[in-house]
Image (cartoon, rainbow, N blue to C red):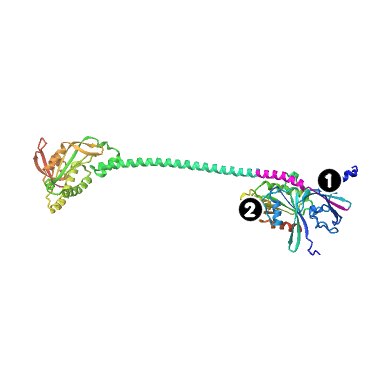
Amino acid sequence: MDELPASVARRLQALIYGERAGAWLQIDGALVLVAAGGYLDAYGLTALRPGEPVLPQALFLEGLLPPVETEFFLPSVELANGRAADLHLHLDGDTIWVILLEMTAERDAVRRVQQKAYDMTLLQEREARLNRQLEAANAALRAAQRELEVSHEQVRAQAAELAAWNRTLEERVATQIDEIERIGRLKRFLAPALAEAIVSSGNERILESHRRDIAALFCDLRGFTSFAENAEPEEVMELLHDYHGRLVPLIQASEGTLDRFVGDGMIVYFNDPLPCPNPAERAVQLAVAMREAMVLLGATWRRRGHQIGFGVGIAQGFATLGQVGFEGRFDYSAVGTVINTAARLCEAAKDGQILVTSRIAVAVSNAADITEIGQLSFKGLSRPLAVSNVAALKVA
Amino acid sequence: MNMMPQALQKKVCVLGGFSVGKTSLIRRYVESIFSESYITTVGVKIDKKTLDLAGRLVSLILWDVAGEDDMASFRMTYLRGAAGYLLVADGTRPATLDVALSLRERVEAACGPLPCALLVNKNDLTEEWTISGTDLEGLRQKGWWVRPTSARTGEGVEDAFKDLAVRVSS
């Protein structure tokens, strides 16, 4: 390299040494500080002690001495006072020279740019992290929403199922209520078991109008009209209550069909609406049971001063039967001469008598002791009838 | 006359990606101070901390080397003469662990095996950590010294530097 002109060398020295706060240290091969100079204050190197080991005095040289290369450079070394310097080391024989050139301003300029770049990178990283968290939260939210939709769908399906069950239940309840109502209606004139059997079979067509051979039983009280005229209504009702309470269970037990109550009179028939074997015999058996029950009840009434007897008439023949009435009020009733005949026989019967037609008498001759009464004429009947009284049932 | 015994001086470098808390860890260790503001380091900043290790004084000359984004620009010359080094990663930024692993490879290639420890910093933000415990356990099983630290609270800082001081001065 050409020698610099003295003027240029001086100018360069002034530029570099003065403007960059140049400082230097001279160190011998034993790492003892020989001499130092320049702007040492700028780097906090104010108490250097030539003749002593350099490393405890210049910490930044720790590990760097002795230098491996003849020239060594470390840029931007910030020392204790905050100022930064480029560090140049070179060997000259056994002497180690260390030169410090300040670069605080350059360091600060780089720092400003670098700070912005790193801040931006950190912001981007943070944004990316937040985005990932947001995406994860969104995914979790979507998953939760899907679960919610599935749950909602399940609830909706369960609600639909429940509604279907409810409808079924309502239908069943309605059916059962209808059944109960129909049973209730039928129980008015049929034995309870018979009414339930008809309803459960679903065959209620048997209640439609039809003709059938039946045994008809008519019974009422002797002396009731005169009693009713003289007694208090409450007393009359009480007596009827006792009377019905005693006889109706017998009718139901015999599976007879109770047509209706007419004051103290009752009409019962057999073989309809369900057929039964030996309707005449059943009618007579019921009549005897009624008479026995009325013996006890009549005694009670007599003790109260009421002279009330009980009579029965039984006839057999074809009648027209079926439901009569209108919606909300139906009865099962029989119409025909056989009913009139039974009513007339009952009317003619004295207390304790069970008057029957000859057909009945023949039909039950093996089951009951019959006493012939004779030919009797009745109002509304064109011909006299051969009438008998049932004395008692034969002992089997 | 100065009667203080001469302390053993050891150069220790603190390395890692940018904004992992290297300067904050040194400041916490040397001055017991923590600042929330982040000021990037340019080049290298040198500090000193003297420890008494069972009556033996050891001065750690701490080189806070700028954490650079671009590994290619990292100056290995700053490590010249280092007795050991600390690698620092940010527990909330998994990429900084990769930087630390890469730095270790480069330091070992240039300087050979030196005492070192991995400080996983920002342990006060564990709910934001994305570096998994499994990864750290894997490194421990490979013989790494892994220390969770927090420059903010000081947790683990003193012990980490002391551990390294013992190892570089023995």
Q: In the image, is residue A27 above or below residue A320? A: below
Looking at the rendered structure, the secondary structure element under dot 2 is helix
Main secondary structure type of the part rendered in magenta: helix
Determine whether, in the image, residue A98 is placed left or right of residue A196: right
Q: Position of residue A197 (x, y in %)?
A: 28, 42
Q: Is residue B170 visible?
A: no
Please state which amino acid type lies under the numbered disc 1: Leu
Q: Position of residue A202 (x, y in %)?
A: 30, 38
Determine whether, in the image, residue A217 is placed left or right of residue B113: left
> Which residue is denoted by mark 2 in the rendering?
B124
Please state which amino acid type lies under the numbered disc 2: Asp
> Which residue is denoted by mark 1 in the rendering?
A15
Q: Is residue B140 visible?
A: yes
Q: Is residue A390 magenta?
A: no
User: Which corner quadrant of the image does residue B6 belong to?
Assistant: bottom right
Q: Nearer the viewer, mark 2 or mark 1?
A: 1
Disc 1: host chain: A
Q: In the image, is residue A175 above or below residue B152? A: above
Q: In the image, is residue A97 above or below residue A4? A: below
Q: Which residues are magenta?
A: A94-123
The answer as to whether the residues below labels 2 and 1 share one chain is no
Instruction: Classify 10 Å Cα crowding around label 1: few (below 14), some (14-19), many (20 and above).
Output: few
